[in-house]
Protein backbone atom coordinates (compact mmCIF):
# COMPACT_ATOMS: atom_id res chain seq x y z
CA UNK A 1 0.00 0.00 0.00
CA UNK A 2 1.38 3.38 -0.99
CA UNK A 3 0.86 6.13 1.56
CA UNK A 4 0.49 9.59 0.06
CA UNK A 5 2.96 12.15 1.26
CA UNK A 6 0.22 14.45 2.51
CA UNK A 7 -1.43 11.70 4.54
CA UNK A 8 0.16 11.49 8.00
CA UNK A 9 -1.42 8.18 8.68
CA UNK A 10 -2.19 4.70 7.48
CA UNK A 11 -4.76 2.21 8.47
CA UNK A 12 -3.68 -1.36 8.11
CA UNK A 13 -2.08 -1.98 11.54
CA UNK A 14 -2.79 -5.11 13.49
CA UNK A 15 -1.33 -6.15 16.78
CA UNK A 16 -0.24 -9.32 18.41
CA UNK A 17 -0.46 -11.14 21.68
CA UNK A 18 0.86 -14.19 23.40
CA UNK A 19 -1.24 -17.35 23.50
CA UNK A 20 -3.49 -17.98 26.50
CA UNK A 21 -2.10 -19.14 29.79
CA UNK A 22 -2.88 -22.64 31.00
CA UNK A 23 -3.04 -24.57 34.18
CA UNK A 24 -0.55 -27.27 34.58
CA UNK A 25 0.45 -30.80 35.15
CA UNK A 26 2.28 -31.13 38.44
CA UNK A 27 3.98 -34.24 39.74
CA UNK A 28 5.94 -34.03 42.97
CA UNK A 29 8.22 -36.83 44.13
CA UNK A 30 10.27 -37.25 47.23
CA UNK A 31 12.87 -39.97 47.55
CA UNK A 32 11.26 -42.02 44.78
CA UNK A 33 7.81 -41.88 46.42
CA UNK A 34 4.77 -40.15 44.92
CA UNK A 35 3.92 -37.23 47.16
CA UNK A 36 1.20 -35.45 45.19
CA UNK A 37 -0.11 -35.36 41.67
CA UNK A 38 -2.30 -33.04 39.60
CA UNK A 39 -2.87 -34.39 36.11
CA UNK A 40 -3.64 -32.54 32.91
CA UNK A 41 -4.10 -34.32 29.56
CA UNK A 42 -3.90 -31.23 27.37
CA UNK A 43 -1.07 -32.78 25.35
CA UNK A 44 -2.76 -36.21 25.20
CA UNK A 45 0.16 -37.74 27.01
CA UNK A 46 0.09 -40.72 29.36
CA UNK A 47 -0.28 -39.08 32.75
CA UNK A 48 0.13 -42.27 34.71
CA UNK A 49 2.90 -42.21 37.28
CA UNK A 50 4.63 -45.44 38.25
CA UNK A 51 4.85 -45.63 42.01
CA UNK A 52 7.48 -48.04 43.36
CA UNK A 53 5.73 -48.14 46.70
CA UNK A 54 2.03 -48.96 46.26
CA UNK A 55 1.30 -48.12 49.86
CA UNK A 56 2.30 -44.53 49.28
CA UNK A 57 -0.77 -43.69 47.15
CA UNK A 58 -2.81 -40.93 48.71
CA UNK A 59 -6.58 -40.88 48.91
CA UNK A 60 -8.12 -38.44 46.47
CA UNK A 61 -10.32 -37.00 49.18
CA UNK A 62 -7.41 -36.27 51.48
CA UNK A 63 -6.51 -32.56 51.72
CA UNK A 64 -3.54 -31.78 49.55
CA UNK A 65 -1.66 -30.03 52.32
CA UNK A 66 -1.33 -33.37 54.12
CA UNK A 67 0.63 -34.75 51.18
CA UNK A 68 2.35 -31.76 49.63
CA UNK A 69 2.84 -29.26 52.42
CA UNK A 70 3.91 -31.56 55.24
CA UNK A 71 7.18 -32.60 53.63
CA UNK A 72 9.86 -30.81 55.57
CA UNK A 73 12.58 -31.76 53.15
CA UNK A 74 10.83 -29.80 50.41
CA UNK A 75 9.26 -31.52 47.38
CA UNK A 76 10.95 -31.62 44.03
CA UNK A 77 8.99 -30.47 40.98
CA UNK A 78 9.49 -33.12 38.31
CA UNK A 79 6.99 -32.04 35.66
CA UNK A 80 5.49 -28.66 35.04
CA UNK A 81 3.93 -26.85 32.12
CA UNK A 82 3.24 -23.23 32.71
CA UNK A 83 0.18 -21.45 34.02
CA UNK A 84 1.55 -18.05 33.00
CA UNK A 85 1.93 -15.51 34.41
CA UNK A 86 1.71 -17.55 37.63
CA UNK A 87 4.27 -20.16 36.63
CA UNK A 88 6.91 -20.52 33.98
CA UNK A 89 8.90 -23.61 33.17
CA UNK A 90 12.66 -23.34 32.87
CA UNK A 91 14.85 -25.38 30.54
CA UNK A 92 15.13 -28.11 33.22
CA UNK A 93 12.22 -29.70 35.00
CA UNK A 94 13.54 -29.06 38.50
CA UNK A 95 14.29 -25.37 38.00
CA UNK A 96 11.38 -22.94 38.03
CA UNK A 97 11.16 -19.24 37.35
CA UNK A 98 8.03 -17.48 38.55
CA UNK A 99 6.38 -14.46 36.97
CA UNK A 100 4.38 -12.05 39.07
CA UNK A 101 0.64 -11.70 38.41
CA UNK A 102 1.12 -7.96 37.77
CA UNK A 103 2.81 -6.25 34.83
CA UNK A 104 6.02 -4.53 35.78
CA UNK A 105 6.67 -6.74 38.82
CA UNK A 106 10.12 -8.19 39.24
CA UNK A 107 10.26 -12.00 39.59
CA UNK A 108 11.48 -12.95 43.04
CA UNK A 109 13.25 -15.95 44.51
CA UNK A 110 10.96 -16.83 47.41
CA UNK A 111 12.46 -18.33 50.56
CA UNK A 112 10.58 -20.18 53.28
CA UNK A 113 9.86 -16.96 55.19
CA UNK A 114 7.77 -15.70 52.25
CA UNK A 115 5.97 -18.92 51.35
CA UNK A 116 2.52 -19.50 52.79
CA UNK A 117 2.92 -21.80 55.84
CA UNK A 118 0.81 -24.89 56.43
CA UNK A 119 -1.08 -23.28 59.31
CA UNK A 120 -2.18 -20.41 57.06
CA UNK A 121 -3.30 -22.86 54.36
CA UNK A 122 -5.42 -24.65 56.99
CA UNK A 123 -7.05 -21.34 57.93
CA UNK A 124 -7.74 -20.54 54.29
CA UNK A 125 -9.29 -23.92 53.61
CA UNK A 126 -11.35 -24.34 56.79
CA UNK A 127 -12.17 -20.79 57.90
CA UNK A 128 -11.89 -18.47 54.90
CA UNK A 129 -13.40 -20.69 52.21
CA UNK A 130 -16.60 -22.61 52.95
CA UNK A 131 -19.81 -24.19 51.72
CA UNK A 132 -21.42 -20.78 51.24
CA UNK A 133 -18.59 -19.33 49.11
CA UNK A 134 -16.04 -21.65 47.52
CA UNK A 135 -15.98 -25.31 48.56
CA UNK A 136 -12.41 -26.53 48.18
CA UNK A 137 -11.94 -30.02 46.76
CA UNK A 138 -8.20 -29.90 46.11
CA UNK A 139 -5.31 -27.52 46.44
CA UNK A 140 -1.76 -27.23 45.35
CA UNK A 141 1.26 -25.10 46.26
CA UNK A 142 3.30 -23.22 43.71
CA UNK A 143 6.19 -20.99 44.62
CA UNK A 144 4.91 -18.91 47.55
CA UNK A 145 1.20 -19.22 46.76
CA UNK A 146 -1.57 -21.80 46.78
CA UNK A 147 -4.05 -22.67 44.04
CA UNK A 148 -7.42 -24.05 45.18
CA UNK A 149 -9.82 -26.03 43.04
CA UNK A 150 -13.42 -26.47 44.06
CA UNK A 151 -17.03 -25.49 43.56
CA UNK A 152 -18.12 -21.86 43.42
CA UNK A 153 -21.28 -21.20 45.42
CA UNK A 154 -23.50 -18.28 44.41
CA UNK A 155 -22.51 -15.27 42.34
CA UNK A 156 -18.80 -14.81 41.78
CA UNK A 157 -18.76 -11.12 42.70
CA UNK A 158 -20.49 -11.69 46.04
CA UNK A 159 -18.34 -14.72 46.76
CA UNK A 160 -15.21 -12.70 46.12
CA UNK A 161 -16.34 -10.01 48.54
CA UNK A 162 -17.15 -12.55 51.27
CA UNK A 163 -13.89 -14.44 50.93
CA UNK A 164 -11.83 -11.24 50.80
CA UNK A 165 -13.53 -9.94 53.94
CA UNK A 166 -12.96 -13.20 55.81
CA UNK A 167 -9.34 -13.35 54.73
CA UNK A 168 -8.86 -9.77 55.91
CA UNK A 169 -10.34 -10.65 59.32
CA UNK A 170 -8.32 -13.86 59.73
CA UNK A 171 -4.99 -13.00 58.07
CA UNK A 172 -4.87 -9.22 57.69
CA UNK A 173 -3.28 -7.68 54.60
CA UNK A 174 -0.49 -10.21 54.15
CA UNK A 175 -2.15 -12.12 51.30
CA UNK A 176 -4.00 -11.38 48.07
CA UNK A 177 -6.94 -13.45 46.80
CA UNK A 178 -7.73 -14.01 43.11
CA UNK A 179 -10.81 -15.71 41.65
CA UNK A 180 -9.87 -16.87 38.14
CA UNK A 181 -11.05 -19.21 35.39
CA UNK A 182 -9.29 -22.51 34.78
CA UNK A 183 -8.65 -22.55 31.01
CA UNK A 184 -8.75 -26.37 31.00
CA UNK A 185 -12.36 -26.78 32.02
CA UNK A 186 -13.59 -23.15 32.29
CA UNK A 187 -14.31 -23.64 36.00
CA UNK A 188 -13.42 -21.14 38.74
CA UNK A 189 -10.21 -21.55 40.72
CA UNK A 190 -9.05 -19.56 43.73
CA UNK A 191 -5.46 -18.37 44.09
CA UNK A 192 -3.88 -16.88 47.20
CA UNK A 193 -0.42 -15.29 47.04
CA UNK A 194 1.64 -13.23 49.52
CA UNK A 195 1.28 -9.53 48.84
CA UNK A 196 5.06 -9.33 49.14
CA UNK A 197 5.28 -10.96 45.71
CA UNK A 198 3.22 -8.17 44.14
CA UNK A 199 5.65 -5.35 44.77
CA UNK A 200 6.31 -3.29 41.61
CA UNK A 201 9.74 -3.43 40.09
CA UNK A 202 12.17 -0.55 40.09
CA UNK A 203 13.78 0.62 36.87
CA UNK A 204 17.31 1.83 36.28
CA UNK A 205 16.02 4.87 34.37
CA UNK A 206 13.30 6.98 36.02
CA UNK A 207 9.94 6.68 34.29
CA UNK A 208 9.54 10.41 33.80
CA UNK A 209 12.93 10.63 32.09
CA UNK A 210 12.24 7.78 29.66
CA UNK A 211 8.71 9.04 28.94
CA UNK A 212 10.05 12.55 28.35
CA UNK A 213 12.67 11.27 25.91
CA UNK A 214 10.06 9.32 23.94
CA UNK A 215 7.80 12.38 24.00
CA UNK A 216 10.45 14.66 22.50
CA UNK A 217 11.14 12.22 19.68
CA UNK A 218 7.40 11.93 19.05
CA UNK A 219 7.08 15.71 18.75
CA UNK A 220 9.80 15.66 16.09
CA UNK A 221 8.18 12.80 14.12
CA UNK A 222 4.77 14.49 14.26
CA UNK A 223 6.24 17.68 12.82
CA UNK A 224 8.19 15.76 10.19
CA UNK A 225 5.18 13.75 9.05
CA UNK A 226 3.20 16.94 8.40
CA UNK A 227 5.90 18.47 6.14
CA UNK A 228 5.77 16.59 2.80
CA UNK A 229 8.82 18.46 1.49
CA UNK A 230 11.05 16.77 4.09
CA UNK A 231 9.67 13.25 3.87
CA UNK A 232 11.42 12.26 0.66
CA UNK A 233 14.86 13.05 2.08
CA UNK A 234 15.10 12.53 5.82
CA UNK A 235 18.69 13.82 6.07
CA UNK A 236 17.61 17.14 4.59
CA UNK A 237 15.74 17.87 7.82
CA UNK A 238 18.91 19.00 9.56
CA UNK A 239 19.59 21.55 6.83
CA UNK A 240 15.99 22.81 6.80
CA UNK A 241 14.88 22.84 10.42
CA UNK A 242 12.94 26.03 9.80
CA UNK A 243 10.54 24.05 7.58
CA UNK A 244 9.37 22.00 10.57
CA UNK A 245 7.24 24.91 11.70
CA UNK A 246 5.03 24.27 8.66
CA UNK A 247 4.00 20.99 10.24
CA UNK A 248 2.97 22.60 13.52
CA UNK A 249 -0.82 22.83 12.83
CA UNK A 250 -1.10 19.17 11.85
CA UNK A 251 1.15 18.06 14.72
CA UNK A 252 -0.94 20.02 17.23
CA UNK A 253 -4.20 18.53 15.94
CA UNK A 254 -2.84 14.98 16.12
CA UNK A 255 -1.41 15.67 19.59
CA UNK A 256 -4.82 17.01 20.66
CA UNK A 257 -6.51 13.76 19.65
CA UNK A 258 -3.80 11.76 21.43
CA UNK A 259 -4.40 13.86 24.52
CA UNK A 260 -8.16 13.26 24.39
CA UNK A 261 -7.47 9.52 24.24
CA UNK A 262 -5.05 9.46 27.19
CA UNK A 263 -6.99 11.87 29.41
CA UNK A 264 -10.15 9.78 28.99
CA UNK A 265 -8.27 6.68 30.14
CA UNK A 266 -7.04 8.47 33.24
CA UNK A 267 -10.34 10.06 34.19
CA UNK A 268 -12.12 6.71 34.21
CA UNK A 269 -9.19 4.92 35.88
CA UNK A 270 -9.07 7.50 38.66
CA UNK A 271 -12.80 7.15 39.28
CA UNK A 272 -12.48 3.36 39.58
CA UNK A 273 -9.25 3.40 41.58
CA UNK A 274 -6.88 1.97 38.98
CA UNK A 275 -3.37 3.39 38.85
CA UNK A 276 -1.78 4.03 35.46
CA UNK A 277 1.84 4.67 34.63
CA UNK A 278 3.21 7.65 32.76
CA UNK A 279 2.27 7.28 29.06
CA UNK A 280 5.15 6.39 26.73
CA UNK A 281 4.37 7.90 23.34
CA UNK A 282 5.68 5.75 20.52
CA UNK A 283 7.19 7.81 17.68
CA UNK A 284 6.84 6.71 14.08
CA UNK A 285 8.58 8.27 11.11
CA UNK A 286 5.90 6.76 8.85
CA UNK A 287 2.73 8.14 10.49
CA UNK A 288 4.07 10.43 13.21
CA UNK A 289 2.99 8.45 16.28
CA UNK A 290 1.59 5.04 17.08
CA UNK A 291 -0.11 6.21 20.27
CA UNK A 292 1.05 5.66 23.84
CA UNK A 293 1.91 2.66 25.99
CA UNK A 294 0.41 2.94 29.47
CA UNK A 295 0.96 0.24 32.08
CA UNK A 296 -1.58 -0.68 34.76
CA UNK A 297 0.26 -0.51 38.09
CA UNK A 298 -2.15 -2.26 40.44
CA UNK A 299 -4.57 -5.18 40.30
CA UNK A 300 -7.76 -4.42 38.37
CA UNK A 301 -10.82 -5.48 40.43
CA UNK A 302 -12.86 -7.17 37.66
CA UNK A 303 -13.51 -7.41 33.94
CA UNK A 304 -16.11 -4.64 33.90
CA UNK A 305 -13.66 -2.14 35.39
CA UNK A 306 -11.02 -3.18 32.87
CA UNK A 307 -13.53 -2.70 30.06
CA UNK A 308 -14.45 0.79 31.27
CA UNK A 309 -10.83 1.94 31.37
CA UNK A 310 -9.79 0.29 28.10
CA UNK A 311 -12.78 1.54 26.09
CA UNK A 312 -12.74 5.11 27.45
CA UNK A 313 -9.69 6.24 25.46
CA UNK A 314 -10.54 5.04 21.96
CA UNK A 315 -14.23 5.84 22.38
CA UNK A 316 -13.46 9.48 23.19
CA UNK A 317 -10.82 9.63 20.45
CA UNK A 318 -13.22 8.24 17.84
CA UNK A 319 -15.97 10.68 18.81
CA UNK A 320 -13.74 13.77 18.62
CA UNK A 321 -11.93 12.55 15.49
CA UNK A 322 -15.21 11.79 13.72
CA UNK A 323 -16.55 15.28 14.45
CA UNK A 324 -13.34 16.86 13.16
CA UNK A 325 -13.40 14.69 10.04
CA UNK A 326 -16.95 15.76 9.22
CA UNK A 327 -16.00 19.38 9.87
CA UNK A 328 -13.06 19.07 7.48
CA UNK A 329 -15.29 17.85 4.66
CA UNK A 330 -17.81 20.63 5.29
CA UNK A 331 -15.19 23.40 5.38
CA UNK A 332 -14.32 24.56 1.85
CA UNK A 333 -10.59 24.59 1.09
CA UNK A 334 -9.26 28.10 0.44
CA UNK A 335 -6.19 29.30 -1.42
CA UNK A 336 -3.03 28.50 0.49
CA UNK A 337 -4.83 26.14 2.87
CA UNK A 338 -6.32 23.38 0.73
CA UNK A 339 -4.37 20.17 0.14
CA UNK A 340 -4.40 18.48 -3.26
CA UNK A 341 -4.97 14.74 -2.93
CA UNK A 342 -5.73 11.92 -5.30
CA UNK A 343 -9.13 10.29 -4.66
CA UNK A 344 -7.39 6.92 -4.36
CA UNK A 345 -6.25 7.86 -0.85
CA UNK A 346 -9.84 7.53 0.34
CA UNK A 347 -9.74 3.85 -0.56
CA UNK A 348 -7.39 3.42 2.40
CA UNK A 349 -10.25 3.57 4.93
CA UNK A 350 -13.83 2.39 4.71
CA UNK A 351 -14.95 5.14 7.11
CA UNK A 352 -13.07 7.97 5.42
CA UNK A 353 -13.99 6.74 1.93
CA UNK A 354 -17.66 6.42 2.81
CA UNK A 355 -17.84 9.93 4.29
CA UNK A 356 -15.92 11.37 1.33
CA UNK A 357 -18.35 9.75 -1.10
CA UNK A 358 -21.30 11.02 0.93
CA UNK A 359 -20.13 14.64 1.04
CA UNK A 360 -18.30 15.02 -2.26
CA UNK A 361 -20.55 12.89 -4.43
CA UNK A 362 -19.62 12.86 -8.14
CA UNK A 363 -16.86 15.38 -7.53
CA UNK A 364 -14.89 12.43 -6.19
CA UNK A 365 -13.71 10.73 -9.40
CA UNK A 366 -10.96 8.21 -9.95
CA UNK A 367 -7.82 9.86 -11.34
CA UNK A 368 -9.03 13.44 -10.77
CA UNK A 369 -7.14 15.15 -7.93
CA UNK A 370 -9.23 17.28 -5.62
CA UNK A 371 -8.55 19.90 -2.97
CA UNK A 372 -9.63 19.19 0.61
CA UNK A 373 -9.31 21.09 3.85
CA UNK A 374 -6.22 19.91 5.83
CA UNK A 375 -8.49 19.17 8.80
CA UNK A 376 -9.62 16.08 6.88
CA UNK A 377 -6.07 14.70 6.87
CA UNK A 378 -5.36 15.68 10.48
CA UNK A 379 -8.57 14.17 11.82
CA UNK A 380 -8.01 11.03 9.75
CA UNK A 381 -4.58 10.63 11.33
CA UNK A 382 -6.13 10.78 14.80
CA UNK A 383 -8.75 8.20 13.84
CA UNK A 384 -6.02 5.86 12.59
CA UNK A 385 -4.06 6.12 15.84
CA UNK A 386 -7.19 5.28 17.82
CA UNK A 387 -8.01 2.43 15.44
CA UNK A 388 -4.65 0.68 15.68
CA UNK A 389 -4.92 0.76 19.46
CA UNK A 390 -8.43 -0.74 19.22
CA UNK A 391 -7.39 -3.90 17.38
CA UNK A 392 -8.01 -6.84 19.75
CA UNK A 393 -4.49 -8.02 20.49
CA UNK A 394 -2.02 -8.10 23.35
CA UNK A 395 -2.20 -5.47 26.05
CA UNK A 396 -3.44 -2.75 23.75
CA UNK A 397 -6.85 -1.20 24.32
CA UNK A 398 -8.50 -3.61 21.90
CA UNK A 399 -6.84 -6.60 23.53
CA UNK A 400 -8.00 -5.51 26.97
CA UNK A 401 -11.51 -4.88 25.66
CA UNK A 402 -11.67 -8.37 24.12
CA UNK A 403 -10.37 -9.94 27.33
CA UNK A 404 -12.90 -8.05 29.45
CA UNK A 405 -15.83 -9.03 27.21
CA UNK A 406 -15.04 -12.64 26.30
CA UNK A 407 -12.44 -13.86 28.76
CA UNK A 408 -8.82 -14.92 28.54
CA UNK A 409 -9.18 -17.92 26.25
CA UNK A 410 -11.33 -16.27 23.57
CA UNK A 411 -9.30 -13.07 23.59
CA UNK A 412 -6.09 -15.05 23.16
CA UNK A 413 -7.50 -16.74 20.07
CA UNK A 414 -8.56 -13.37 18.70
CA UNK A 415 -5.05 -12.06 19.32
CA UNK A 416 -3.58 -14.99 17.44
CA UNK A 417 -5.83 -14.17 14.50
CA UNK A 418 -4.75 -10.52 14.64
CA UNK A 419 -1.05 -11.36 14.61
CA UNK A 420 -1.64 -13.72 11.72
CA UNK A 421 -3.32 -11.01 9.68
CA UNK A 422 -0.60 -8.57 10.63
CA UNK A 423 2.03 -11.02 9.45
CA UNK A 424 0.33 -11.22 6.07
CA UNK A 425 0.11 -7.42 5.84
CA UNK A 426 3.80 -7.08 6.71
CA UNK A 427 4.64 -8.83 3.44
CA UNK A 428 3.27 -5.86 1.52
CA UNK A 429 3.61 -2.95 3.94
CA UNK A 430 6.71 -1.76 5.78
CA UNK A 431 4.52 0.00 8.34
CA UNK A 432 2.87 -3.32 9.23
CA UNK A 433 6.30 -4.94 9.60
CA UNK A 434 7.48 -2.15 11.88
CA UNK A 435 4.28 -2.42 13.88
CA UNK A 436 4.42 -6.19 14.41
CA UNK A 437 7.99 -5.95 15.69
CA UNK A 438 7.03 -3.12 18.01
CA UNK A 439 4.05 -4.99 19.43
CA UNK A 440 6.03 -8.21 19.85
CA UNK A 441 8.58 -6.55 22.10
CA UNK A 442 6.41 -4.01 23.92
CA UNK A 443 2.74 -5.01 24.04
CA UNK A 444 2.34 -8.71 23.41
CA UNK A 445 1.00 -9.45 26.91
CA UNK A 446 -0.31 -11.53 28.54
CA UNK A 447 -2.77 -9.38 30.45
CA UNK A 448 -2.19 -9.69 34.19
CA UNK A 449 -4.84 -11.56 36.19
CA UNK A 450 -7.67 -9.51 37.63
CA UNK A 451 -8.86 -9.88 41.19
CA UNK A 452 -12.07 -11.53 39.95
CA UNK A 453 -12.29 -12.77 36.36
CA UNK A 454 -15.48 -14.82 36.52
CA UNK A 455 -18.19 -12.14 36.34
CA UNK A 456 -19.09 -10.79 32.90
CA UNK A 457 -19.53 -7.03 32.38
CA UNK A 458 -23.02 -5.56 32.14
CA UNK A 459 -24.60 -5.49 28.70
CA UNK A 460 -24.34 -1.71 28.36
CA UNK A 461 -20.56 -1.86 28.79
CA UNK A 462 -20.35 -4.85 26.46
CA UNK A 463 -22.14 -2.73 23.86
CA UNK A 464 -19.57 0.06 24.27
CA UNK A 465 -16.76 -2.44 23.76
CA UNK A 466 -18.35 -3.76 20.57
CA UNK A 467 -18.79 -0.20 19.27
CA UNK A 468 -15.08 0.55 19.84
CA UNK A 469 -13.96 -2.62 18.05
CA UNK A 470 -16.40 -1.96 15.18
CA UNK A 471 -15.25 1.64 14.69
CA UNK A 472 -11.64 0.50 14.67
CA UNK A 473 -12.53 -2.03 12.00
CA UNK A 474 -14.24 0.62 9.86
CA UNK A 475 -11.14 2.82 10.00
CA UNK A 476 -8.73 -0.02 9.22
CA UNK A 477 -10.63 -1.76 6.43
CA UNK A 478 -10.22 -0.35 2.90
CA UNK A 479 -13.06 1.20 0.92
CA UNK A 480 -13.59 -1.32 -1.91
CA UNK A 481 -16.09 0.50 -4.15
CA UNK A 482 -14.87 2.60 -7.10
CA UNK A 483 -15.62 6.29 -7.17
CA UNK A 484 -17.67 7.69 -10.01
CA UNK A 485 -15.88 8.23 -13.29
CA UNK A 486 -18.73 10.27 -14.71
CA UNK A 487 -17.99 13.99 -15.09
CA UNK A 488 -19.77 16.27 -12.69
CA UNK A 489 -22.67 18.22 -14.17
Image: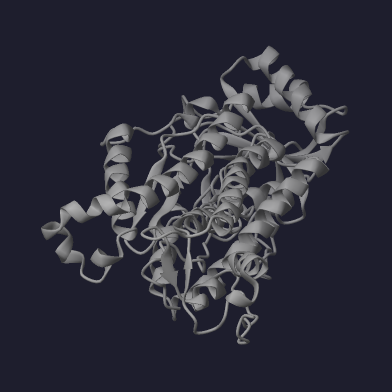
Left or right of 221: which side holds 266? right
Is residue 268 at least partly visible in the picture? yes
- Height in image: 25 above or below 165? below
Relative image position of residue 122 (x, y in whole percent): 69, 25
Residue that extends furthest to the left in the rendered view of this protein? 239
Q: How is the image coloured?
A: one colour
Please report the residue visible at 71 percent of the width from the left and 38 percent of the height from the top: 304
Q: Quadrant of residue 175?
A: top right
Q: Residue at x 48, y 54 (%)?
A: 375
Report the side of 403 relative to 266 (left or right): right
Q: Quadrant of the C terminus?
A: bottom right
**Is residue 71 visible in the rendered structure shown here?**
no
- Residue 94 horizontal/vertical position (percent): 46, 52
Q: Quadrant of the N terminus?
A: bottom left
Using the image as rendered, state which of residue 439 and residue 187 is in the foreground: 439
* Farthest-out residue, bottom: 486
Residue 77 placement (x, y as % from top left): 52, 50
The image quadrant of residue 169 is top right
Foreground: 320 or 364? 364
Given residues 296 and 144, the one toward you in this image is: 296
* Res 271 → quadrant: top right
Q: Is residue 59 above or below residue 380?
A: above
Question: With respect to residue 241, does 59 lie above or below?
Answer: above
420 on left or right of 359: left
| Percent x, y of residue 217 | 27, 48
**What is the count of numbered marks?**
0
Nearest the eye: 472 or 374: 374
- The residue sitting at 74% across, 36% down in the picture is 63
Q: Residue furthest front?
A: 489
Amino acid sequence: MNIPAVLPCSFNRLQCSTPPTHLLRLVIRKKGRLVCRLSHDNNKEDDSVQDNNNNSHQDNDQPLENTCLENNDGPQLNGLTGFEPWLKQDDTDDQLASESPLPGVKPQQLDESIRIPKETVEILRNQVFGFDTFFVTSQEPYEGGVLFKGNLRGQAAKTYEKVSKRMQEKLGDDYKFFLLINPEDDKPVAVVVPRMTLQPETTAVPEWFAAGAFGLVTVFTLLLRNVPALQSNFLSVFDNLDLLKDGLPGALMTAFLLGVHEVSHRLVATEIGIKLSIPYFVPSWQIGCFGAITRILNVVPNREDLLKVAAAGPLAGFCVGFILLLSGFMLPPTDGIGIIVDPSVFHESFLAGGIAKLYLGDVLQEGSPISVHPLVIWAWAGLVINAINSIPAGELDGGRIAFAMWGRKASARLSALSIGLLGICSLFNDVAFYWVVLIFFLQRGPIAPLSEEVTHPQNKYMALGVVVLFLGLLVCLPYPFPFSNQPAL
